[in-house]
Image: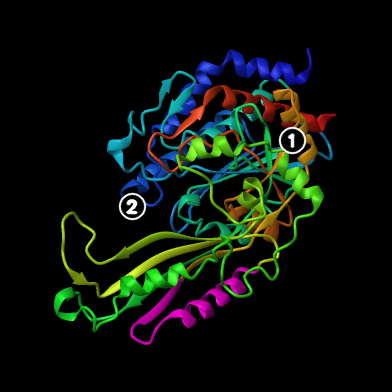
Amino acid sequence: MDKDQTAINYFQENQDALLEQYFNILRIPSVSTDPAHKSDMVRTAEFLADYFKKLGVDRVEIFPTKVHPIVFAEKISPLPNAKTLLVYGHYDVQPPDPLHEWRTAPFEPTLVEDYVYARGASDMKGQVMASIFALESVLKTNELPINIKFIIEGEEEIGSPSLEDFLKNNTELLQCDMILNPDAGMISASQPTIVYGLRGMVYFELRIDGPKMDLHSGLFGGNIANPANVIADIISKLHNPDGTVAIPGFYDKVRHLSPEERERIATAGLQEDAYVQLTGVPRLYGEEGFTMLERQGSRPTLDVNGLYSGYIEEGAKTIIPAFAKAKISCRLVPDQNPEEIYKLIQSYIASLVPNTVRAQIFKHSLGPAYLADDAPGSKNLADALTKTWGKPVSLKREGGSIPVATNMQELLGVKSMLTGFGLPDDAIHSPNERQHMPTWTKGVQALIRFFLSFAE
């Protein structure tokens, strides 16, 4: 029996006990944004540290930060000249609200057919525990052929405010040859996926102020500029009729997609009909001249994320609101500089603001795009996924942003392999989050094969 199968047998034979540990961490409401759960954050960090200690790793440490603790663990290979893998994860979760939309208790994991429902089941406690169980299965049955380090933070869902300083202050501790970040996901349950690209981000807030207070629309309407009307007019001018962003210079540094890259993107195979069904929209919308998958990960965007102005409760109240606000984000692609794009946005919006109101723009966050099709260890990971699923891996450029990948490349000098075993319909950040257990089980087996592949 080969080493892979021996370790996989351990996982399968102990799966019930391991699942109970998975469920135990799901039961801890580690909501990083809510101060009421600060003790739960500490409790989750201690749960992980205790589990690592039971595995007999060489070093476990909980590092306090100004917000929530970071868990570090390290296991050294007995083999000489072993490569070092750093596994990244986060143990914090999104708030469960709105609670009335959950069909099961959000912090009591519930198995329904092939799914476990709970907050964090997919994002990303499920992926963290899959990585730990894969390590456990290897340690219980084989010599570990690589050194493995884990860094598991508790602030990813609030923008990782402590992580960059931790990376800067611990570069020697975190030194590695390759990085695995299982915080991405799969195209479908039958298609193993490696994400090789991420979009960057510019996130800002636009505020339009008019009168010093809400005014009666009958007495003042027609003489006072309405901030809600003004912000709606500005927003309407941020896109062209063909779906492109109207800001001058926005596309100046966007890379053209080569025929080879378009072919690679197309191999992901996600169909538009499936996307329509998943989202519930009547039909898709987007920039002309590009496929759905190309727009999803390879083209930049601008979207309004939230709007607020005036009276928004039930019933009527006839006012001219004193102000209006819009939260807006841009997803960026390689070579677009976030600071440059932000300045272009400021300049263009300023040109649209009439002199009858006052405008302010508040910058929330900036982050560059990321490409890592040549991340160290990618072939080993692809081979492990292919052997487990019995089909070639799809390479995907993800539409979202994972800033930690860029931070690690800048500060540790290593690109990250991005994968994971969540699915598009897992409802992460939404009520009824879930993890497809057959996919998760295969994911653990693939990680076992990946961890062992370096002995060959």
| Residue type at numbered disc 1 | Leu
| Front residue of 394 and 404 | 394
| Residue type at numbered disc 2 | Pro
- Which range is magenta? 337-362
- Residue at the spot 85% in from the left edge and 29% down from the top edge: 456
Side of 310 relative to 90 (left or right): left
- Residue beneath disc 2: 35
Tag in front: 1 or 2: 1
> Counting other residues with Cα less than 10 Å from the Cα at mark 2, is it few (<14), some (14-19), or many (20 or more)?
few
Dot 2 falls on a residue whose secondary structure is: helix
Dot 1 falls on a residue whose secondary structure is: helix
- Residue at the spot 33% in from the left edge and 34% down from the top edge: 102
The stretch drawn in magenta includes residue 344: yes
In the displayed structure, 452 sits above or below 299; it is above
Q: Identify the image quadrant of the N terminus.
A: top right
Residue 336, picture quadrant: bottom right
- Residue at the spot 45% in from the left edge and 18% down from the top edge: 113
Residue 257, picture quadrant: bottom right
Q: Is residue 179 visible?
A: yes
Where residue 381 appears, as percent x and y from the top left, is 74, 35
Side of 399 relative to 145 (left or right): left
- Residue at the spot 63% in from the left edge and 52% down from the top edge: 295
Measure how far apart labels 1 and 2 are at the Cα level: 38 Å
- Residue beneath disc 1: 381
The stretch drawn in magenta includes residue 166: no
Where residue 53 appears, as percent x and y from the top left, is 56, 33
In the displayed structure, 417 sits above or below 111; it is below
Side of 288 relative to 119 (left or right): right
Where residue 423 appears, as percent x and y from the top left, is 55, 34
